[in-house]
Image (cartoon, rainbow, N blue to C red):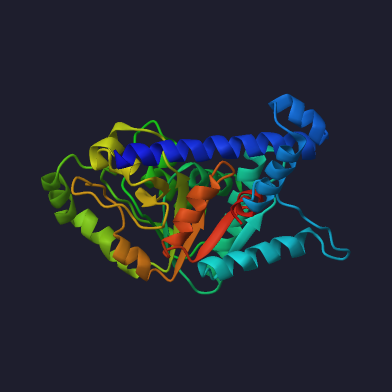
């Protein structure tokens, strides 16, 4: 009963936000008058004024004042500084979104490469790489470069391999490409990302290959992890790992293939037999770099950053601005 009431309240909030957005869009973007909007929605003009005020209070509408002498770069740095304060980040890069999601993701990928090269240039030599669409885009940009990237001395996957048809989720292939286009020595994890039982997981963890990767995880200096929405791709594997828990506990984001609740806690399940870097080891990595794409929901970004695992953020500026 309580869960049903929560779902109804959640739906009511969503409908309310959609209405505020519709009113604000007509007023601020389409130049409708408040009287015209009132007629459209069958409400009074004072009610339109009240809704516009509420849209500002709830962050549906943000007003930016252009200060002479304060250019786009200064604004981006100021936004990143706010993220450092709010989430305890050490650094990162916020990227101008460009024209469309494709251009935005390419720009984020290029910024991610530059940031990783900067860490390697500062002496951090052991890298781990996650998976996902935006990580795959970063690897594709590495592959297209005419010169090798400067990316440390070794690179390993942080998670097992996904489906054969999903290139961006095939961890060994991502690592292979990076090794081929850099001086980093690739290390491979010869196991699927999911096991069907605890016995299979235990047998996998006893394998020599897994133990070698586990030793590499313990020595990592940099870990690149994807920040994804929930549900990123609704699949049977997640259902098998968690049952109804992800819906009941309001999962909001994914880091690697860990699901995260709205308040930043990582959801745990007794039937989760995923093969990925343990969280206690991820927490010990000095530089965990979270990267997200142009379609990342601000709610997901907020939840991921609340976990405390991410120390650096590479993200589209638009997504970051929507969150704050």
Instruction: State the quadrant of the C terminus.
Output: bottom right
Residue 167 image position (x, y, % from top left): 43, 37
Who's the residue at 31% across and 68% down the image?
218
- Residue 217 visible within the image: no
Q: Residue furthest bottom?
A: 123
Quarter of the rendering containing residue 39: top right
**Residue toward you, 125 or 119:** 119
Q: Position of residue 138 (x, y in %)?
A: 54, 48
Which residue sits furthest left?
199
Is residue 259 shown above or below 124? above
In this rendering, would 178 be left or right of 30?
left
Where the N terminus falls, by quadrant? top left
Residue 168 appears anywhere in the view: yes
Please provide percent x and percent y for residue 130: 41, 51
Count numbered badges in the picture. Answer: 0
Q: Residue at x 25, y 38 (%)?
A: 243
């Amino acid at each position: 009963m309580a869960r049903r009431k929560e779902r109804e309240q959640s739906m009511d909030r969503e409908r309310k936000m959609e209405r505020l957005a519709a009113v604000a869009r007509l007023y601020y973007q389409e130049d409708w008058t408040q009287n015209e909007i009132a007629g459209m929605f069958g409400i009074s003009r004072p009610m339109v004024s009240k809704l516009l005020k509420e849209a500002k209070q709830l962050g549906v509408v943000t007003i930016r004042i252009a200060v002479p002498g304060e250019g786009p770069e200064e604004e981006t740095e100021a936004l990143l500084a706010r993220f450092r304060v709010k989430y305890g980040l050490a650094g990162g890069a916020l990227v101008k979104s460009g024209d469309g999601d494709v251009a935005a993701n390419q720009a984020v990928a290029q910024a991610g490469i530059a940031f990783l090269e900067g860490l390697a240039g500062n002496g951090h030599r052991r890298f781990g790489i996650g998976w996902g669409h935006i990580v795959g885009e970063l690897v594709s940009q590495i592959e297209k470069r005419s010169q090798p990237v400067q990316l440390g001395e070794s690179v390993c996957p942080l998670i097992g391999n996904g489906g054969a048809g999903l290139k961006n989720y095939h961890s060994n292939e991502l690592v292979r490409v990076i090794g081929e286009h850099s001086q980093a020595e690739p290390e491979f994890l010869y196991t699927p990302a999911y096991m069907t039982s605890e016995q299979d997981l235990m047998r996998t963890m006893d394998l020599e290959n897994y133990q070698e990767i586990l030793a590499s995880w313990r020595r990592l200096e940099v870990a690149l992890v994807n920040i994804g929405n929930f549900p990123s791709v609704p699949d049977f594997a997640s259902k098998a790992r968690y049952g109804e828990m992800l819906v009941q506990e309001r999962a909001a984001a994914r880091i690697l293939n860990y699901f995260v609740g709205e308040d930043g806690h990582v959801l745990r399940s007794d039937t989760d037999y995923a093969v990925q870097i343990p969280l206690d080891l991820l927490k010990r990595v000095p530089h965990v770099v979270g990267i997200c794409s142009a379609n990342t929901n601000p709610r997901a970004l907020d939840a991921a950053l609340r976990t405390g695992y991410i120390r650096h953020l590479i993200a589209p500026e638009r997504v970051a601005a929507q969150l704050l």
